[in-house]
Image (spheres, helix red, strand yellow):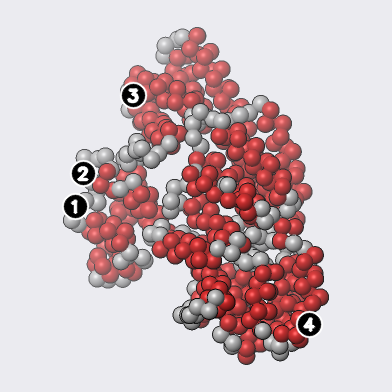
Amino acid sequence: MKQILELINVIDSYKAQNIQVLQNPFATNNKYSTFYKGIKEGSIQSDADAANLLYNSGPENHKYKKLKYRFRQRLLNSILFIDVNKPNYTDIQKAYYNCYKDWATVRVLLGKGAVRSAIAVAEKTLRHTLKFEFTELSCNISRVLRLYFATTEGSKKKFDKYNGLHKEQLQILQAESFAEELYGDLLIDFVASRATKSEYVDKASVYAEKLRPHLERVYSYTFLFFAYSVIVARSEIANDYDNVIRESQKAYELLSQKAFHLKVQIFPFAFKIFSSYTKLGKYDLAHSYIEPCLMALDEGSVNWFKFNQVHFIYLMHTEQYKAAEVLVRKVCAHDRMKYQNKETQEVWRINGAYTYAMNHWNASNNGETKTNNFKLGKFLNEVPVFSKDKRGLNISIIIVQILILLQRKKYNKIIDLISSLERYSTRYLRKNETYRSNCFIKMLISLSKGSFAHPAVLRHSEKYVAKLSEMPLHRSSQSLGVEIVPYDRLWGFILDELK
């Protein structure tokens, strides 16, 4: 079912009614149409839902299984017929889809023996693949043309032309493949958790130095993207955000100088500059990269959700709590949210909890009416993935629980939570990327030690407040998403609440 949801997400973004085939496979009033509309409108979210709606049975029904298989095939067949020549697509996006369609046409024509037609399409397509630096396609097409003009036309001139071109593109492809390999090998360990893995600094440094010599002779956007991604990753892992900004700006400028607009490739570097400035607390400079990031994004894309997570952190760090709440509502209400992975959905539930807590405090300080409509138990049931992440966002989950319970003066529940929190701190938190969180948890533990009395809590927490100030946020190696609100500011709110 996940594959079908993903395919419908793609097709629906292009509008199914615009598919250029003799008959739209989803327009007729049949079970395929019902299946498509059910998923699109949200009434079908699982195999059980689909089987019940279509056959009034369970998902093991053989008729349903057969229909599901054929439905998936129709979706796959429809992908190649989607019209991508629309104003909202950049030149390179249109060229990418059209060139790959043309390459498929070349292979089919060759297989059917229509060689002259195939070669005509191949030569035309090659001009576009070279212009837009589609190296892999250029390699494949030049190889076909090289063989054709050697064995069919007997043209030494054209053979030499395409043979030389093939070798040139093959060298570029090898450099791109090498950069992609190192990037993948470096990033593979960072997928499961948000905690920073500083032990990979040496590995990243070796990889970055291996790629630097290639930067002097390979200028394709694919190579530049992966090479600079590795170079920037090294600085990120080393917690050197000033260098992240410098290297990202180099990549941003090189990719921006291309004759075509590389939205997908430019965004990660604009995003890294924005997030690094946010991490360093240079909020004015961070603000200047919000628009470049948004211009490189399609609303509802995976990167749109990724950018808005850091945008949310930026708003929280700059005390724009109302704007952060508006952003949370916009993102959570987006019709693409249901297609995001569980981790992304949980992150935005955590964000919602923080906006509730901070706006609740602001309302209290401003003499406004406070609401207690946040269901803490429901929230905890909705974040099971990161509740198991002992060095990542689970810290944020525990902290926001205490904040909300403190606002509601549920001191006994806080004491129960702090009792387990003390064991958690001793077992899982070390003086590395979790150091600031470790200090703040010790400060929270002082709430129960001081019996929630302001003077006593001050006394018990004094040592850890000093330790926290010795490790500013911009110097810590923890993930930006862990400290949703700077701990120093949160502690000020907590002390005010105790008064």
Which circle, 3 or 2, is nearer the viewer? 2
Location of mark 4 (residue): 460
Q: Earlier in the sequence, mark 1 or mark 2?
A: 2
Q: Quadrant of residue 63?
A: bottom left
On residue 23, which mark appears?
2
Assess whether mark 2 and mark 1 are in contact (beta carbons under 8 angstroms): yes
Viewer can see residue 173 = no
Query: 314 or 36, which is in the foreground?
Result: 314
Q: Secondary structure at mark 2?
A: loop
Type of amino acid under label 1: Thr
Image point (31%, 45%), residue name: 78
CA separation in Å, label 1 and label 4: 71 Å
Q: Is residue 430 above or below residue 216?
A: below
| Residue indicated by mark 3 | 113
475 to 371, vertically: above or below: above
Inter-mark Cα distance, 1 to 3: 36 Å
Residue located beneath label 1 in the image: 28
Asked if the residues shown at circle 2 and circle 4 are in contact, with their CB atoms under 8 angstroms apart, the answer is no
- Which amino acid type is shown beneath numbered disc 2? Gln
User: Three-letter amino acid code at disc 3?
Assistant: Gly
Total labels: the figure holds: 4
Mark 3 Cα shell of 10 Å, populated few (<14), some (14-19), many (≥20): few
* Residue 105 in the image, given as x and y percentages of width and height: 36, 30
Seen at 73% across and 67% down, the residue is: 436
- Frontmost of labels 2 and 4 is 4
The spot of residue 134 in percent (x, y) is 50, 31
- Residue 281's label in the rendered image is none
Q: Which residue shows up at 58% across the image and 22% down it?
A: 167
SS of the residue under disc 4: helix
Q: CA distance from mark 1 to mark 2?
A: 9 Å
Task: Indicate left or right for 198 with 20 as reference.
Answer: right
- N-terminal label among 1 and 3: 1
